[in-house]
Image: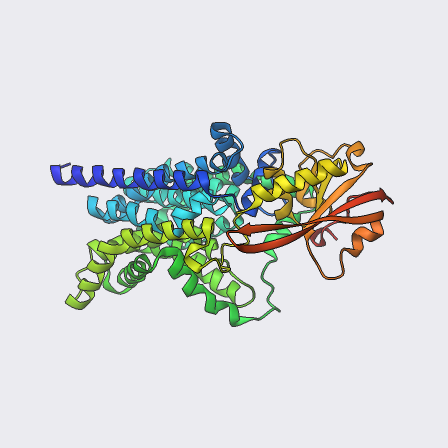
């Protein structure tokens, strides 16, 4: 490696470490989201599966809290640090598939400045480990292509297995890999080799705890997730959300480069056939499904996490390899120069807005309900009300409120979701003594009150109305009800719709 190349590698590493450091700082003072609080509760009771997703997100959070405790930083630290091996995987993938330090370095930096990676590893959801595992799927497939050695298929299987443990979306990797092998003449020999099938067995073995958990729980997780989009529910309005949300998650300039890269790989023949087709099959196999899904139901922006590694490599190829016409070249150069600064500014602005609301003049925005700003203060008021009333347990009606209560109330406080008990099937049953006396219910104020609680308890008395605020903005107002005289089982143990 020459002096110039070594300097590029060193500077790339420094930029990525700095970006990871920025996320760690943001993670330490940004309250957790309700999903993170929910997954944190999973991490306290590790299992082979959960109602909503496979278990990898719980493992990631558990690893982080072992490092930094049950804090916002502890929940997030391991996920954020996973960006380092992710960056290595994307760097090596680009270097193998398209050659050159510049393409590799561009790929690593562009991925890290997308909102999908910067926010997606800071806010810990199943998409965070999925993004990392997807980068390694691409890397190990590139190693198969580079070396021709069958043993790399075992690594591919391990990466796909880790992706499957993160989210069910990873099942599309199998179809993408088969399409790639069939489309590239020189790779068809692998169909007659045992190695790809052994790799498939590795993936299956890693995923088997999820299968066993579902078998023990009426297949509820599979039914819930695989039944999201129903053919009879044709609602094409959702497809209009796809491109705007992905422009935001990729950041606009990276999105432009990625789109130009996919165009170049298709029509300009940039790179070798096998490399081009690997990028395109990993990208389009999943994107085509999500386009179909969006004709029937909403597709959340973060669901596209597994296509970001190939998309970013395509963007780097567009920036460094394609001989564009002068006008297009100017656009590429502009995007390449400003992609990182724009991505960093967008990330910083989002963190400031989520924590303070300054940028919108304290009005509501997309972050206001999901990020737990104000919950630490609210939890202190709820705990004071619980102590005054002598209640032994706190009940909530949704998993998000349950998670926030468990995270921000004093450790060891009895907190339970009164309904949807399938979400907590991996947790030990609560001590009946804690449910036998006075309880308090925490829920958003609703017109007409809570008839279900009136039916369950002889006496329901509202003892407080408490607000969660971000600056002067009231996000939610909660009614705190004292519950006395339970008429039966306090917890609604009805089976979920998927198990009926």
Q: Who's the residue at 52% across and 51% down the image?
A: 470
Q: Nearer the viewer, residue 97 or 220?
A: 220
Residue 419 falls left or right of residue 236: right
Does residue 373 show up?
Answer: yes
Q: Who's the residue at 70% across and 35% down the image?
A: 414
Q: Position of residue 314 (x, y in %)?
A: 30, 55
Which residue is most to the left?
A: 3
Which residue is most to the top?
A: 66
Report the number of numbered marks: 0
Q: Nearer the viewer, residue 249 or 312?
A: 249
Q: Who's the residue at 74% across and 34% down the image?
A: 430
**Image coloring type:** rainbow
Q: Is residue 216 above or below residue 187?
A: above
Q: Quadrant location of residue 475?
A: bottom right
Q: Who's the residue at 55% across and 51% down the image?
A: 469
Q: Position of residue 339 (x, y in %)?
A: 28, 54
Residue 464 falls left or right of residue 488: left
Does residue 54 show up?
Answer: no
Image quarter (top left, top right, bottom left or bottom right) of the N terminus: top left
Residue 129 falls left or right of residue 84: right
Q: Quadrant location of residue 389?
A: top right
Residue 270 falls left or right of residue 21: left
Q: Position of residue 410 (x, y in %)?
A: 62, 33
Q: Position of residue 465 (x, y in %)?
A: 68, 51
């Amino acid at each position: 490696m020459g002096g110039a190349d070594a300097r590029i590698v060193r500077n790339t590493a420094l930029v990525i470490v700095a970006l990871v450091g920025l996320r760690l700082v943001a993670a330490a003072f940004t309250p957790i989201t309700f999903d993170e609080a929910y997954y944190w509760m999973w991490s306290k009771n590790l299992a082979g599966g959960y109602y909503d997703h496979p278990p990898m997100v719980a493992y990631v959070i558990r690893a982080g809290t072992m490092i930094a405790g049950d804090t916002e930083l502890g929940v997030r630290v391991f996920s954020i640090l996973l960006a380092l091996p992710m960056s290595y995987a994307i760097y090596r993938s680009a270097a193998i598939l398209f050659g050159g330090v510049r393409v590799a370095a561009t790929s690593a930096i562009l991925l890290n400045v997308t909102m999908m990676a910067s926010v997606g590893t800071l806010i810990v959801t199943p998409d965070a480990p999925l993004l990392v595992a997807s980068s390694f799927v691409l890397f190990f497939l590139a190693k198969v292509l580079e070396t021709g050695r069958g043993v790399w298929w075992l690594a591919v299987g391990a990466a796909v297995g880790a992706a499957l443990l993160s989210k069910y979306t990873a099942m599309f990797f199998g179809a993408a890999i088969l399409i790639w092998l069939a489309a590239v003449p020189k790779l068809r020999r692998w169909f007659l080799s045992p190695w790809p099938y052994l790799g498939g067995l590795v993936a299956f073995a890693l995923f088997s705890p999820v299968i066993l958990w579902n078998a023990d729980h009426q297949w509820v997780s599979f039914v819930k997730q695989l039944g999201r989009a129903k053919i009879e529910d044709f609602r094409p309005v959702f497809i209009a959300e796809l491109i705007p949300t992905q422009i935001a998650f990729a950041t606009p300039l990276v999105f432009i480069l990625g789109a130009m890269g996919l165009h170049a790989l298709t029509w300009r023949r940039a790179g070798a056939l096998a490399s081009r087709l690997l990028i395109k099959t990993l990208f389009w196999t999943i994107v085509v499904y999500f386009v179909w899904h969006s004709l029937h139901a909403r597709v959340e922006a973060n669901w596209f996490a597994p296509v970001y590694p190939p998309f970013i490599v395509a963007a780097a190829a567009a920036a460094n390899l394609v001989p564009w016409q002068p006008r297009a070249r100017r656009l590429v150069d502009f995007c390449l120069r400003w992609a990182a600064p724009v991505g960093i500014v967008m990330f910083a602005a989002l963190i400031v807005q989520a924590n303070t609301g300054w940028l919108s003049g304290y009005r509501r925005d997309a972050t206001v309900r999901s990020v737990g700003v104000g919950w630490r203060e609210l939890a202190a008021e709820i705990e004071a009300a619980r102590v005054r009333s002598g209640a032994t347990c706190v009940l909530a009606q949704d998993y998000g409120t349950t998670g926030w209560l468990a995270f921000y109330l004093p450790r060891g406080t009895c907190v339970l979701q009164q309904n949807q008990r399938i979400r907590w099937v991996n947790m030990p049953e609560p001590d009946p003594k804690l449910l036998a006396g006075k309880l308090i219910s925490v829920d958003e104020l609703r017109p007409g009150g809570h008839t279900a609680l009136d039916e369950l308890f002889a006496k329901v008395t509202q003892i407080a109305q408490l607000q969660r605020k971000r600056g002067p903005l009231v996000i939610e107002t909660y009614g705190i009800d004292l519950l006395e005289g339970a008429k039966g089982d306090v917890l609604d143990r009805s089976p979920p719709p998927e198990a009926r």
